[in-house]
Amino acid sequence: MKIRSVINSTLAFALLGLASCSKSNNGPDTPPDTAVEKFVIAGIAATAEQDKQYLFLADRLDEGEITVKGNGYETAGGTMYALNNKAITFKYNRGDPGNAEVFQLDAKNELTKTGAFNVKSVNVFLPLKAGDHLIAYNIGRSLTTPGTAYWVNTQTNAVDKQLDVDQKLIYIDGKHIDNHFGWPYAFFEFGDKIYAPLLPAYGGSGDKDPAGFDYRNRAFVAIFDKNLKFEKTITDTRMPYIGQYYNNIGLGQVANGDVYAFSNGDVASSNNHSAFLKIKGEQFDKDYYWDVEAVAGMRIRAGFFLKDNKFVLVMTPRDNAKAEADGVKLAIVDVVKKEFKWVSGVTSKITDPGFGFPLFTVNGKSYLPLQEGQASVSYLYVIDADNNTAKRGLKMTGIKEISGVGSLKK
């Protein structure tokens, strides 16, 4: 999910179109849309009405084209999740109350607003696997400010539980580290637990990290129960912190049930390589470590679990000038076998949008939105994990910064 450029955004499902691109209606000579499923895409208009957030509908993702013109559903929110046959958007508003809106398909297979509610600006999201609730979380930005979690009921379109969460979560060898707190960068549902990769932060008084990195050269994961009651924090010194703000969960559960975690390596310490660790039995497995950056010669920019034991990784050079000139590259890794393979089929330069690389998987296929240098054209690339290939799917003209995809049924 991704917010706009006002802040460090990630997966904010920014929503697109033009003000003039209001909902298109079937004309008197147009047959009704009989499709049973539509795909909803969130992004921003790359045309005259910049920065307005919209939802778009598409009939399929693996081919075809949609455009801004005549196909935009303007929303107040910049982050979208689709679950329980609804698209829910959240407005990021720098800590102030943000308007959330709920959309569904009507009898004509067009989007219609069916609900709204208010929460603080939320920047971490967890659609629960049961589909009945979405946890939305407002990060506390100081040592004394708790985070706030909202349980959004996807049946009633309302918040039916709210909880303050103490973010004094930085523990090393079981000992709490005073004057530091942890930003939950994501929530990850694992059985009856919720895992939260943490960004350590200094609280502004007392002792600092003696190494000078505010403990960001370590990996931290806080473990909660399903009601976000804190249980413990696990840590490891072999790689830096996990995840990225508003974008990268940094965790994935493979076929045998183990959880793998990766770091972007985005710190200045000597322990800065992008790598994978394994979490087993609610502890980091001391026998598993894989330095992906040493294999690729590039660091992980973003990554997502695909299927079986495989992740798709967006890789980027560490040198900023080279990264801007060359763009990013895709790779598929098998974390159990420690196999790294570059993805073929992407022949154009792919620009780094700054934050969002949301992955969407449906009917056994995975789709990654990529922008090929033109601010006005984006594509959904179809990722084939079995053959380590990608190919252009849906073309989106006049649309940029695709930050979310979901499916809705009539």
Image: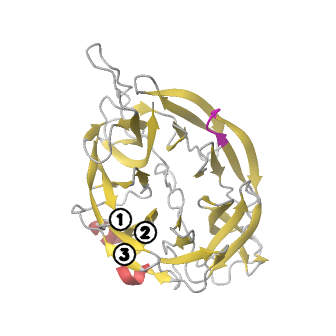
Is residue 327 or residue 55 the one in the foreground?
55
Instruction: Give the labeled residue for mark 3.
Output: 319
Eyeballing the image, is 339 above or below 117? below
Of the two numbered discs 2 and 1 on the same chain, state the one appearing first in sequence: 2
Badge 1 amino acid: Ala
Disc tally is 3
Assess whether mark 3 and mark 1 are in contact (beta carbons under 8 angstroms): no
Eyeballing the image, is 401 above or below 119? below
- Residue 109: x and y in percent read 40, 27
Neighbours of disc 1 within 10 Å: few (<14), some (14-19), many (20+): many
Eyeballing the image, is 325 above or below 228? below
Badge 3 amino acid: Asp
Of the two numbered discs 3 and 2 on the same chain, state the one appearing first in sequence: 2
Is residue 241 or residue 391 the one in the foreground?
391
Of the two numbered discs 1 and 3 on the same chain, state the one appearing first in sequence: 3
Q: What is the span of residues highlighted in magenta in the rendered image?
A: 152-157
Q: Secondary structure at mark 2?
A: strand
Instruction: Give the labeled residue for mark 1.
Output: 385
Magenta stretch, overall SS: loop
Q: Which mark is residue 171?
A: none
- Residue 397: x and y in percent read 27, 42
Badge 2 amino acid: Lys
Q: Nearer the viewer, mark 1 or mark 3?
A: 1
Neighbours of disc 3 within 10 Å: few (<14), some (14-19), many (20+): few
What residue is at 68 percent from the left and 44 percent from the top?
151
Q: Marks 1 and 3, how far apart in space?
A: 28 Å
User: In this rendering, does residue 262 appear at all?
Assistant: yes
What residue is at 22 percent from the left and 61 percent from the top?
348
Neighbours of disc 2 within 10 Å: few (<14), some (14-19), many (20+): many
- Residue 150: x and y in percent read 68, 45
Q: Marks 3 and 2, how far apart in space?
A: 27 Å
